[in-house]
Image: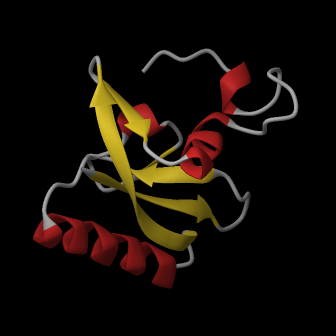
Amino acid sequence: MKVITANRLLKGDVVWLGESGTWVERITLARIFEGKEAVAEGLAIGAEAESRQEVVGVYEMDVTVEDGVIVPVRLREKIRATGPTTHLNLGKQAQAVSA
């Protein structure tokens, strides 16, 4: 299982490609891609958004689903999904999660 991730060009926020083709700020709202063709489709959508200068650094990342929640596999991606590791009161981890 994979999701497509990038950074917003203007603010640098980490984002994920959502179900409706929009970029979402919570990994829990990301669209899951399974299989090479589906991942290629997601990357093509990301490349198109990158060409419009909406996002930069589009790539696929491995995830699992645990108790219905999307969880990144790699530590780097876990950090990107939650925010900085310096203080728990900064980044996405400091915001209320309703998704």
Q: Is residue 38 left or right of residue 59?
A: left
- Residue at the bottom extreme, as displayed: 51
Image quadrant where one finds the C terminus: top left
User: Where is residue 30 shown, x and y percent of the image?
Assistant: 36, 43
In this view, 98 is above or below 18: above
User: Where is residue 39 shown, x and y percent of the image?
Assistant: 23, 66
Q: Nearer the viewer, residue 57 or 63?
A: 63
Q: Is residue 94 left or right of residue 35?
A: right
In this view, 97 is above or below 56: above
- Residue at the right extreme, as displayed: 86
Residue drawn at the location 75% of the way across and 33% of the way down: 91
- Residue at the front extreme, as displayed: 74
How did the renderer colour the structure?
secondary structure
Identify the image quadrant of residue 8. bottom right
Residue drawn at the location 28% of the way across and 17% of the way down: 67
Label count reads 0
Q: Nearer the viewer, residue 38 or 19?
A: 38
In this view, 44 is above or below 7: below
Q: Is residue 34 left or right of residue 77?
A: left
User: Where is residue 62 shown, x and y percent of the image?
Assistant: 36, 53
User: Where is residue 50 shown, x and y percent of the image?
Assistant: 49, 77
In this view, 92 is above or below 32: above
Residue drawn at the location 53% of the way across and 51% of the way down: 15
Residue drawn at the location 15% of the way across and 70% of the way down: 36
